[in-house]
Image (cartoon, rainbow, N blue to C red):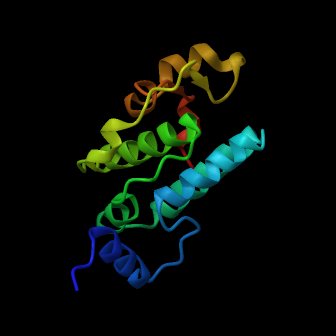
Amino acid sequence: MDPSTETINRILRACVPRRRRWPTIAELAQAVAHALRADAAGDVWRLVGEFIDDDRGADDRELMLVIADPPTSTGEPRADALAAALAEHLCTRRGLVPPAWTQSAPEVTPWWFVAGDAYRALALRDSPPSFARRGIFVTAGALERV
């Protein structure tokens, strides 16, 4: 047999001892797209927060395994761009090279200000480069978990 990289990654993920709410960034992207289509934008950042919480207890190898496979297009550009931005951001924060698939994510137009118009100036100033270059603007505290 000649298994694909995706199949091998799925087998390896099954061997990860910790339980994660989001086993892959692809699954997170689908959930984010569903929330955006249901006009539940408030749920989006809760989902992202859960992924960040999962990452906090992970080592570098686990993170790379969770973000290794490119998500299929969700049909929702904000969800696709968010998945790439988040994967790149988490890698950059750890000093890791992000997967190549993160470089092909689309820019969100019109720009997406996650916290709304009231925080537009702060988000323009504070957004990490991985988010800003994709047209997603967040305030500094949006990616920090306590």
Above or below residue 126? Residue 15 is below
Residue sitting at x 58%, y 49%: 48
Picture coordinates of residue 42 (x, y %)?
74, 41
The residue closer to the viewer here, 2 or 77, is 2
Q: Position of residue 51 (x, y in %)?
A: 54, 57
**Residue shown at the point (59%, 68%) measured from the top left:** 21
Q: In the picture provided, is 21 more to the left or to the right than 115? A: left
Along the horizontal axis of the image, is 2 left or right of 76?
left
- Residue 116: where, in percent of width, then height? 70, 23
The residue at the point 77 percent across, 44 percent down is: 38
In the rendered view, would you say 40 is above or below 10?
A: above
Q: In the orientation shown, which residue stands out farthest toward the right? A: 39
Identify the residue shown where x is 58% and y is 13%. Answer: 121
Extreme residue in the top direction? 121
Asked whether the viewer can see residue 128, the reply is yes
> In the shown orientation, is residue 36 left or right of residue 98?
right
> Which residue appears farthest toward the front when viewing the image?
1
Q: Quadrant of the N terminus?
A: bottom left
- Residue 49 shows up from this direction: no
Give 19 or 134, whichever is nearer the viewer: 134
Give the mark count: 0
